[in-house]
Image (cartoon, coloured by chain):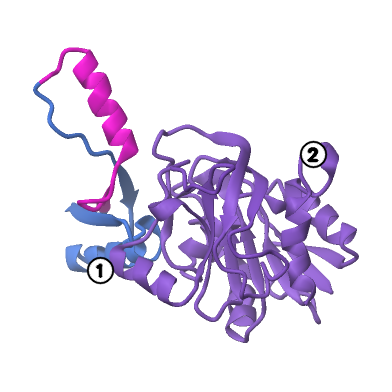
Amino acid sequence: MKVIINVFLKEGVLDPQGKAIHHALHSLGFSNVNDVRIGKQIVMHIDAIDSIDAEAKAIEMAETLLANTVIENYSIEIAI
Amino acid sequence: MRVAVLQFPGTNCEFDTKYAFKKLGHEVELVWHQNQTLPEDIDLVVLPGGFSYGDYLRSGSIAHFAPIMKAVKTYANNGGKVLGICNGFQILTEAKMLPGVLKRNNNLHFISKYQHLTIVENNNSFLNQCKKDELLHLPIAHADGNYYIDDAGLESLKTNGQILLRYSDKDGNLVAVNGSTESIAGICNKEKNIFGLMPHPERAIEMILGSTDGLKMLQGFKN
């Protein structure tokens, strides 16, 4: 089963990479950009009984390794 | 004193760290990350600087699952002293052995230079040879040294005397080097047996290197 985990910095935690890209976009003329946040996408194929099982496994992986929940949030998508 | 210095794939400060502790007259043993146990009768475990596992995912995030880290956690839970320098500090925060997180530097640059630091707390087994508000001069070399902690965590650090060092200028005024919360450069846990700092004391041990302030810090562990 294909599992996609998106990890991104929490609201209020300064994202210097996002800020740098924001500035770069502005200097290229994309003045309508108001905010840029950078995240990570982790795509994996896992053995699971069903999507509920896959999600439970993905949550465990995100909590133990993939996200540092002090500063990061994550979301999980299950693509069958 | 017997010191165990850990080696992860990508660690690169273990020999400098060994040299520094040997210079102070201690026995030093390098310990490979795949080991399940620490050497017996050690007085200090050091997690040295470097780029363990290439800093993949987040600095220190993969190293803290190395087999040796279970032994380090048990050792620390029993009151054993642990020191994390630079990447070692990052590993200790990822392992939740120290509070907070080390984020990417605000300016996104790898910062490598000599930096002034102010001693905040010396009432611990690490910085007891230094005076409060004393200025030190040490090298820093990191991309992820931007210490972040939430407001409640910061208050708790202050209440319990856990802030060890802050980045400052030569007159002791705090400076924003990498974006760290309140210019924090080093902290310890509440029990004061786990220490973490971004600057490199092991690189400031002979005048030919520009400073001997690092020796003064590491000497604290004798007592």
Q: Residue placed at 22% from the left, 13% from the top?
A: A28
| Image quadrant containing the C terminus of chain B | bottom right
Q: Is residue B189 above or below residue B22?
A: below
Residue B131 picture location, percent across and down = 66, 65
A54 versus B36 height, above or below: above
Q: Amino acid at mark 2?
A: Leu
Going by the numbered disc 1, the residue's amino acid type is Ala
Chain name for mark 2: B
State the SS at label 1.
helix
Q: Is residue B168 left or right of residue A10?
A: right
Does residue A30 show up magenta in the picture?
yes
Q: Residues within 10 Å of mark 1 (few under 14, many from 20)?
A: few
The secondary structure type at the circle numbered 2 is: helix
Give the residue number, with chain letter if any, for mark 2.
Answer: B209
Q: Nearer the viewer, residue B166 or B178?
A: B166
Give how far across and how far down residue B214 sits, in percent. Answer: 73, 53
Q: Are marks 2 and 1 on the same chain?
A: no
Q: Is residue B14 visible?
A: no
Residue B73 image point, x, y percent: 58, 76
- Judging from the image, mark 1 belongs to the subunit labelled A
Residue furthest out toward the front: B171
Q: Quadrant of residue B41?
A: bottom right
Tag 1 residue? A56
Q: Looking at this rendering, what residue extends furthest in the left direction?
A: A32
Hue used for the chain lettered A: blue
- Tell me, for residue B201, which label it has, or none: none
Q: Quadrant of the N terminus of chain B?
A: bottom right
- The segment highlighted magenta reads A2-31
Q: Which chain is purple?
A: B
